[in-house]
């Protein structure tokens, strides 16, 4: 009380000039305190800029958006058939199943189907069912499909970008699209599915260093070019890294972020301690029963499995062009390399099956359409290089970036995803989780494998976010 009176006295004894100085200083200090308190919350990562062609960036850019149609030719199909015909197979070992990689007896069946039954012309018509476009951004022709909704009376249209990963493509979203663009509730989506530069019909970078951050910036530029100022984003695999980067770069543009692959950890020693304690006293470290089921036995489900399954990553993150050369010359080799991932990443136990369990969840038509997107565009090498660019010198910026994400987030944890991320860990990176769902079934390629489940989760998440937004 006394100090307050003394302060009042001191202040009243000041002359107007001194008072002004005091006022300015206190406003300054207050502002600084507010800034320090809020700084963490609003920390964005730099947007940056890029140019991915050899030579100088021109002063003006061509912003036109051109319609694009997927085309095929008789020569292309003949060449493909000839190469399939000339494939040299190596007999798989007795009872090898998928343990040594793609089983060659089953590979012959896939090749036979591809050569004699698969109808690429028909699949091209399927691909062209949605309108495709290309537009040049940072020197690259960026491809995307743009699906307008079937809007019912009173429905709000929400823009949504969905980003694929490796070894997938925009085609992974074909089954989920109708479930998002023809809904019945209060809102419906207008969906944009781009191809990552170097994947499918998007031009590959011509210079080194193209990472998730660059893809994120390019996709923001694409949305801006389409006149969207705020939108939802969804992704798994690289798509998850890219959409997270989008949320870090321009959080003001992201209405909500929905992921089916979560990259977050408790952090250093804390992760190890929570993993050690978690098995016996899960509540102490915030694990649920479901987390315990999905994480343990730890060595089998995490360490050994990752060692067995991540060889491709080491190759692609070091010398992608060498192995890629063979794949780009042999369609059957390419199919083995890519489809092996669709087998194990859908369910690790598929390794025990003669046919890798591929047709349990997917049709050969769908799987081969994805392969054809890589084959006909020659994009396997550029798609593999994306690992080197992200995991080399840029590792801390892209793969290991722990910068917090503050936009509304929805997480769908599929049981057969490669690694499980408990909600308590996710909270350390995503500060505004609106929904976290233990999905009942499904693996890494969620949209392709379980479109209905993924759509349901995305819809309930967006409903939550929309209901909390100021009207
Ligand atoms: C493969 O090529 C050989 C030689 O050109 C030809 O006799 C054979 O019919 C072809 N087989 C298939 C399945 O196309
Ligand atoms: C994440 O990446 C951004 C962009 O390069 C960088 O500014 C930031 O420091 C990175 N965060 C961490 C924790 O490495």
Image (spheres, rainbow, N blue to C red):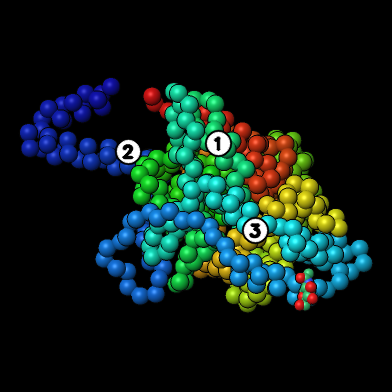
Q: Is residue 423 visible?
A: no
Which residue carries the number 1 mark? 180
Query: What label does residue 439 carry, if any?
Result: none
- Determine whether, in the image, residue 398 is placed left or right of residue 438: left
- Circle 2 sits in a helix, a strand or a loop, which is it? helix
Q: Is residue 114 visible?
A: yes
Mark 2 and mark 1: span between their CA atoms?
A: 41 Å
Which residue carries the number 3 mark? 120
Q: Nearer the viewer, residue 132 or 18?
A: 132
Which of discs 2 and 1 lies nearer the camera? The answer is 1
Disc 2 or 1, which lies upstream in sequence? 2
Give neighbour class at mark 2: few <14, some 14-19, many 20+ (Cα, 10 Å): few
Q: Residue at x 73, y 49 (%)?
A: 362
Image x and y of residue 194, in percent:
49, 52
Query: What label does residue 34 carry, if any?
Result: 2
Which of discs 2 and 3 lies nearer the camera? The answer is 3
């Amino acid at each position: 009380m006394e100090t307050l009176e003394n302060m009042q006295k001191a202040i009243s004894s000041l002359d107007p000039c001194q008072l002004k100085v005091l006022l300015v200083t206190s406003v300054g200090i207050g502002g600084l305190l507010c800034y320090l308190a809020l700084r963490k919350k609003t920390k964005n990562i730099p947007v940056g800029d890029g140019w991915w062609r050899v030579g100088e960036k021109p002063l003006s850019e061509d912003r036109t958006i051109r319609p694009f149609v997927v085309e095929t030719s008789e020569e292309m199909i003949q060449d493909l058939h000839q190469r399939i015909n000339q494939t040299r197979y190596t007999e798989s070992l007795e009872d090898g199943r998928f343990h040594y990689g793609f089983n060659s007896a089953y590979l012959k069946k896939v090749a036979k189907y591809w050569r004699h039954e698969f109808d690429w012309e028909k699949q091209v018509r399927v691909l062209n069912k949605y309108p495709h476009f290309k537009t040049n951004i940072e020197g690259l022709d960026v491809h995307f499909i743009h699906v307008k909704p079937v809007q019912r009376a009173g429905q709000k249209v929400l823009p949504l970008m969905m980003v694929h990963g490796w070894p997938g493509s925009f085609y992974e979203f074909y089954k989920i699209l109708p479930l998002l663009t023809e809904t019945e509730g209060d809102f419906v989506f207008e969906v944009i599915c781009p191809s990552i530069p170097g994947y499918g019909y998007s031009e590959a970078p011509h210079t080194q260093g193209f990472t998730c951050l660059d893809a994120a910036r390019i996709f923001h530029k694409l949305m801006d070019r389409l006149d969207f100022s705020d939108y939802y984003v969804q992704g798994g695999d690289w798509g998850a890294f890219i959409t997270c980067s989008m949320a870090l770069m321009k959080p003001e543009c992201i209405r909500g972020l929905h992921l089916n692959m979560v990259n977050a950890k408790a952090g250093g020693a804390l992760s190890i301690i929570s993993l050690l304690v978690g098995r016996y006293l899960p509540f102490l470290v915030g694990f649920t029963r479901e987390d315990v089921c999905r994480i343990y036995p730890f060595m089998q489900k995490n360490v050994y499995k990752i060692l067995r399954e991540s060889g491709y990553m080491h190759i692609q993150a070091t010398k992608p062009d060498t192995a890629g050369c063979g794949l780009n010359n042999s369609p059957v080799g390419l199919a083995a390399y890519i489809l092996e991932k669709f087998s194990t990443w859908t369910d690790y136990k598929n390794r025990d099956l003669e046919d890798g369990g591929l047709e349990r969840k997917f049709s050969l038509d769908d799987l081969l359409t994805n392969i054809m997107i890589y084959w006909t565009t020659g994009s396997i090498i550029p798609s593999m290089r994306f690992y080197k660019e992200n995991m080399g010198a840029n590792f801390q910026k892209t793969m290991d970036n722990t910068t917090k994400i503050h936009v509304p987030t929805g997480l769908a944890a599929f049981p057969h995803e490669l690694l499980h991320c408990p909600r308590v860990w996710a909270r350390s990176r995503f500060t505004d989780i609106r929904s976290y769902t233990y999905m009942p079934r499904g693996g890494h390629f969620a949209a392709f494998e379980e479109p209905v489940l993924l759509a349901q989760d995305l819809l309930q998440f967006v409903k939550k976010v929309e209901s909390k937004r100021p009207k």
